[in-house]
Image (tube, rainbow, N blue to C red):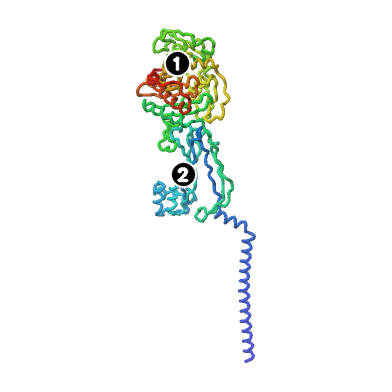
């Protein structure tokens, strides 16, 4: 029995020892497998999947951000800024990181000028998004104050905002952009591609809240837009705007336009309109004030066309300066239509026809010359066609060309009815008279040298017409257009405005077109005032004084030597008035 017991005990001991050894081996095996698995995973992570994992990490910490490019600067001919882009901040939110119930949102809404309720609702509505704008293009100080609240998911980034230093004075020329700096009106629209920059890109390191820790690498630098140097002289633009605004207010007029050209280059030195708008504050913007009326609005030029009719007569060779026309009895009838002068002037030479603004005189000449002769000259002067200035919305006007001219059509064309022009076209026609017969292409860009022009009238004809225009200002309907110490020449015009039912009996446009100094013209200016309601409405009473003040100041600013001496006689001529 004892032997058997001893054998049994020995067997149990061996069994226990074997079990212990198996357990140890199993644990050791599992441990080794775990170590091997960990080792393999380490090798896999650091060798096999290294590139993939690095990219995944970079996706979560490294971002490619856009670098905004500022828009090109628009300046006047002397480098004065008319449109610039200034750095501002845009505050945005990542709704997935922002708690709509955060109590600090009340302060954030107050800083940004938003409704607290609307802000919380937007954050709830777009909770699944990672980006929404809160307030675009604000002052950096406002953005800093908003970020200082420490609201989760609220960030800011730099953008650019367009600013117009001259405000409403240059609004119709320069135009404006939308919030993304895309041109909407004026030069900003016409030259949008030229002014627009090309954004750049960079890699940045961000923290887990999306804030940039550091810039890592520049991928592509931003390219700013190209600058533009306009032909506009801001000094002349200011004084033209001031005087036009004053006369529109004084006469309670519907609006007005003034255009000023350099006679030797075709450059636009000033172009203003009433009413206007402030492109820096468009909260009260009225659609009717957006138009650059000097280019987009058409009107019948009236008596301002009479000098051009006389130029056609002189060019034909059938008339000389001393030719006479019998205007008796002071009117002409064409069926039910009658052309009248203010009174019966009797026999007039060509100069007196301009001085007295005789409708009968020029209509007799037109009948003799024929409608085609008049129309052909008008067309050579640029009427009835685009000026080529490249401005959006330009209207070309109407220059009639019937198969067969009726006498009444020839007559009305001679004094500016039955046709339409814009103020810039009328200024271009007078520019040809002023510079000796050369038609230069008009430009809103500053010209480094005189452009190639086209001769459309002889120097002899234009000199004779300028002498007549000088007399029209010295003793005719344009007496109030005399610009102080400079001799000027020009022609008044007073035309009925056209309404829904044809010509309006009590609504007029007062016009003056002229040049100075008349013996060696530097500037041509056209002034047009719509529907003056207070006081007189004649071109000689309303538009001519604006011409006088603007031209006098402009010539002094351009350092043109005065021609005339100050005297009581001269002051009397400047302040007295005529009608046209």
Q: Mark 1 points at which residue?
A: 471
Marks 2 and 1: CB-CB under 8 Å? no
Q: Quadrant of the N terminus?
A: bottom right
Disc with the residue nearer the chain's start (2 vs 1): 2
Instruction: Determine whether 491 is above or below 393 in the image.
Output: above
Coordinates of residue 48 in the picture (x, y in percent): 64, 60
Element under disc 2: strand
- Check disc 1: other Cα within 10 Å, few if <14, some if 14-19, many if 20+: many
Judging from the image, what secondary structure is the residue with disc 1 in?
Answer: helix
* Image: 110 above or below 393: below
Residue projecting furthest to the bottom:
2
- The reply to whether residue 504 is in sight is no
Q: Where is residue 539 in the image (x, y as percent from the top left)?
A: 41, 20
Rendering coords of residue 469 (x, y %) = 46, 17
Q: Which residue is drawn at 58% across and 51% down?
A: 217
* Quarter of the image that includes the C terminus: top left
- The answer to whether residue 407 is visible is yes
Residue at the spot x=54%, y=46% of the render? 67
Horizontal side of residue 461 vs 546, given as left or right: right
Task: Kindly identify which numbered label has been placed on residue 273.
Answer: none
Q: Residue 137 has which mark?
A: 2
Q: In the displayed structure, would residue 281 be above or below residue 125?
A: above
Q: Where is residue 130 in the image (x, y as percent from the top left)?
A: 49, 51
Mark closer to the observer (2, 1):
1
Q: Which of 2 and 491 is in front in this view?
A: 491
Q: Using the image as rendered, state which of residue 525 and residue 206 is in the foreground.
A: 525
Classify mark 2: residues with Cα within 10 Å, few (<14), some (14-19) or many (20+): many
Residue plotted at (49% across, 30% down): 232
């Amino acid at each position: 029995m004892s032997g058997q017991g001893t054998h049994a005990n020995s067997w149990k001991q061996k069994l226990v020892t074997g079990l212990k050894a198996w357990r140890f081996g199993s644990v050791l095996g599992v441990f080794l497998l775990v170590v091997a698995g960990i080792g393999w995973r380490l090798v896999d992570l650091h060798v096999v999947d290294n590139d993939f994992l690095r990219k995944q990490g970079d996706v979560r910490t490294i971002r490619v951000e856009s670098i905004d490019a500022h828009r090109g600067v628009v300046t006047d001919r002397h480098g004065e800024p008319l449109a610039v882009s200034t750095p501002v901040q845009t505050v945005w939110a990542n709704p997935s990181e922002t708690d709509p119930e955060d109590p600090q949102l009340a302060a954030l809404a107050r800083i940004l000028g938003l409704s607290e309720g609307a802000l919380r609702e937007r954050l709830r509505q777009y909770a699944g998004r990672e980006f929404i704008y809160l307030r675009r293009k604000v002052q950096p100080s406002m953005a800093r104050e908003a970020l200082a609240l420490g609201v989760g998911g609220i960030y800011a980034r730099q953008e650019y905002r367009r600013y117009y230093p001259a405000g409403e004075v240059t609004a119709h020329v320069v135009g404006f952009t939308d919030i993304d700096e895309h041109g909407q009106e004026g030069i900003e629209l016409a030259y949008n591609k030229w002014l627009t920059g090309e954004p750049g890109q960079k890699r940045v390191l961000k923290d887990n809240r999306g804030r940039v820790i550091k810039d890592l690498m520049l991928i592509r630098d931003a390219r700013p837009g190209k600058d533009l140097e306009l032909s506009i002289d801001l000094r002349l633009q200011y004084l033209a705007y001031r005087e036009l605004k004053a006369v529109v207010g004084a006469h309670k007029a519907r609006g007005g336009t003034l255009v000023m050209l350099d006679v030797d280059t075709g450059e636009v030195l000033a172009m203003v309109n009433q009413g206007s708008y402030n492109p820096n504050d468009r909260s009260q913007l009225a659609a009717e004030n957006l138009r650059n009326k000097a280019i987009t609005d058409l009107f019948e030029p009236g008596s301002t066309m009479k000098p051009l009719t006389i130029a056609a007569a002189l060019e034909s060779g059938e008339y000389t300066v001393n030719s006479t026309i019998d205007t008796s009895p002071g009117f002409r009838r064409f069926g039910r239509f009658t052309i009248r002068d203010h009174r019966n002037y009797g026999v007039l030479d060509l100069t007196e026809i301009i001085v007295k603004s005789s409708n009968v005189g020029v209509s007799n000449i037109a009948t003799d010359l024929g409608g085609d002769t008049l129309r052909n000259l008008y067309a050579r002067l640029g009427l009835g066609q685009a000026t080529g200035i490249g401005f959006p919305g330009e209207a070309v006007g109407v220059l009639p060309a019937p198969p067969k001219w009726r006498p009444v059509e020839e007559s009305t064309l001679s004094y500016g009815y039955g046709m339409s022009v814009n103020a810039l076209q009328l200024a271009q026609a007078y520019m040809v008279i002023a510079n000796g017969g050369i038609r230069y292409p008009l430009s809103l860009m500053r010209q480094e040298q005189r452009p190639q022009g086209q001769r459309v009238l002889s120097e002899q004809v234009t000199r004779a017409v300028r002498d007549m225009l000088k007399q029209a200002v010295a003793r005719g309907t344009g007496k109030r257009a005399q610009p102080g110490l400079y001799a000027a020449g020009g022609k008044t015009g007073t035309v009925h405005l056209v309404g829904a039912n044809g010509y309006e009996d009590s609504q007029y446009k007062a016009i003056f077109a002229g040049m100075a100094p008349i013996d060696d013209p530097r500037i041509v200016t056209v002034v047009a005032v719509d529907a003056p309601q207070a006081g007189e409405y004649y071109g000689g009473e309303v538009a001519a004084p604006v011409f006088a003040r603007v031209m006098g100041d402009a010539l002094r600013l351009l350092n043109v030597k005065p021609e005339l001496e100050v005297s009581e006689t001269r002051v009397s001529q400047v302040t007295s008035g005529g009608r046209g």
